[in-house]
Image: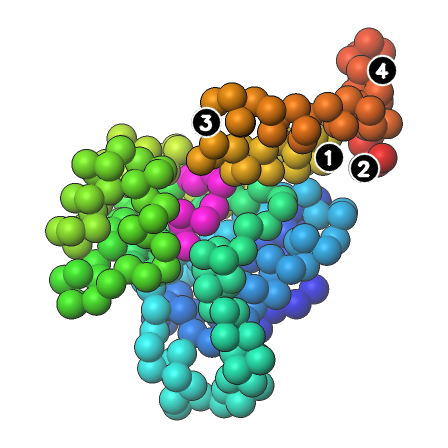
Amino acid sequence: MGGTEHLTVERHGATLVLTMNRPEAKNALSLPLLVGLYDGWLEADADDTIRSVVLTGAGGDFCAGMDLKALAGKGMAGDHYRDRLKADPDLHWKAMLRHHRPRKPVIAAVEGYCVAGGTEILQGTDIRVAGEGATFGLFEVKRGLFPIGGSTVRLPRQIPRTHALEMLLTGRPYSAEEAARIGLVGRVVPDGTALEAALETAERINACGPLAVEAVKASVYETAELTETEGLASELLRGWPVFETADAKEGARAFAEKRPAVYRRE
């Protein structure tokens, strides 16, 4: 497994857990953190024994956004990471899930601050669980900046436009309860239990047929901007091949035999 000094990687069964690990800076995005994230997404895609990914933060916070000083490599030994960014100028966007969508489901486990770039990364995840004390928001306009991590495009497609524009144009903080009410997160749990809840959701996903799970996720995103007629046609192209897999036959047998299915990605 990979990882850097600011991003830890662990396995919990079939789940890969990526932990943003700069608690002294509320897990603000640095080059080592971004490189670790990108490598984590690649690892999840490449390893078929990984069926889901959980993204979280250390020290009671998710992510407080971009650390511009660290991104420039100032005050840290960053030659190796600067070389990575130079070799792939889009690496930081891919790390933040702006230009990259992992094929495995990504579950965000949010505690504490999830603001600015943290809220932008959140929009690239598939399922979102938040501790009740979490704080969300896109603060860029308050600092005369632009939320260029994808929020002006993705946020109005994920929550009602009036809420998206209020968040984007006021730069105000949002509580976990309000974030859930407008649809930015799916579930609010007691503080300190977001990771546990996310891992429970991951286990439910892991028990399902991996080929079916990945095809369903792909179909949801592929059809998002299509007309209903186009989307239904696209869904058939994704869905029918799943019925021909050995895993689909195993699922039916396991149901008939009243036992857990054993899926082999076949």
Please say whether residue 122 is one of the residues in the magenta stretch.
yes
Q: Mark 4 and mark 2 in contact? Answer it, CB < 8 Å.
A: no
Q: Rounded to the nearest whole Å, what is the CA distance between mark 2 and mark 1?
A: 6 Å
Q: Rounded to the nearest whole Å, what is the CA distance between mark 1 and mark 3?
A: 25 Å
Q: Is residue 54 left or right of residue 255?
A: left
Q: Rounded to the nearest whole Å, what is the CA distance between mark 3 and mark 4?
A: 36 Å
Q: Can residue 136 be spotted in the picture?
A: yes
Q: Residue furthest top?
A: 256
Identify the secondary structure beneath mark 3.
Answer: loop
Point out the tag, 1 or 3, that comes first from the N-terminus.
Answer: 1
Identify the residue under disc 4. 253
State the residue at coordinates (38%, 42%): 130
Nearest to viewer (mark 3 / mark 4): 3
Q: Which residues are magenta?
A: 121-129
Q: Mark 2 and mark 1 in contact? Answer it, CB < 8 Å.
A: yes
Label for residue 265?
Answer: 2
